[in-house]
Image (cartoon, rainbow, N blue to C red):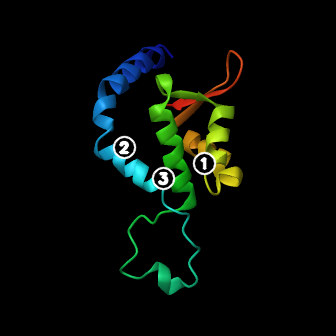
Amino acid sequence: MRLLSHRRPLLSAAADTLRPSLRGKTSDAITALSVLPPPAAPTSITSTTSSSTPAFPVTPQGILLAHVFLRLLDAEAHSLTMSAMKAALARVPGGEEGGVKSIYYAVGKRGLAIKRGGGEARVEFA
């Protein structure tokens, strides 16, 4: 447990140091993904196997995750309350029904953490 307590300040300091460089390619890619409309469901098996589809197709959950990560990158101390995150995702198409699910998906993949102590739950990078 001691390793984790020492690791968080280092990660936070590293994120603050790298923040200006995040405004470059990575932030542009996340922003571009976040403005895409949700894709339509494939109508047949052949549409998913054509050569024009990317190796990693854009999914509604991927778009919602891009919005989550953008909000956290722009937030003070890279942390937001759960209610603020839900409100931000509610403004995104599909965010009402899939927003919280995408946050818990990222928690399960250990990309995000939900801190529940001291009042309202906070969403932050793991």
Helix, strand or loop under label 2: helix
Q: Which residue is mark 3?
A: 34
- Distance from label 2 to label 1 (Cα)? 19 Å
- Distance from label 2 to label 3 (Cα)? 10 Å
Q: Name the foreground residue: 40 vs 12.
A: 40
118 left or right of 3?
right
42 left or right of 3?
right
User: Given this view, does label 2 or label 1 mark the residue nearer the observer?
Assistant: 2
Q: Is residue 103 above or below residue 123?
A: below
Q: Residues within 10 Å of mark 3 (few under 14, many from 20)?
A: many
N-terminal-most mark, 2 or 1: 2
Query: Residue placed at 36% from the left, 19% from the top?
Result: 13
Q: Name the foreground residue: 44 vs 90.
A: 90
Quadrant assignment, res 83? top right
Quick check: marks 2 and 1 in contact, CB under 8 Å?
no
The x and y percentages for residue 60 are: 57, 60
Which amino acid, mark 2?
Answer: Ser
Query: Residue placed at 36% from the left, 51% from the top?
Result: 29
The x and y percentages for residue 112 are: 53, 36
User: Given this view, does label 3 or label 1 mark the residue nearer the observer?
Assistant: 3
Which amino acid, mark 1?
Answer: Ser
* Residue 84 seen: yes
N-terminal-most mark, 2 or 3: 2
Q: Is residue 31 above or below residue 76?
A: below
Query: Residue placed at 70% from the left, 51% from the top?
Result: 96
Which amino acid, mark 3?
Answer: Ser
Q: Which residue is mark 2?
A: 27
Q: Which residue is mark 1?
A: 102
Helix, strand or loop under label 3: helix
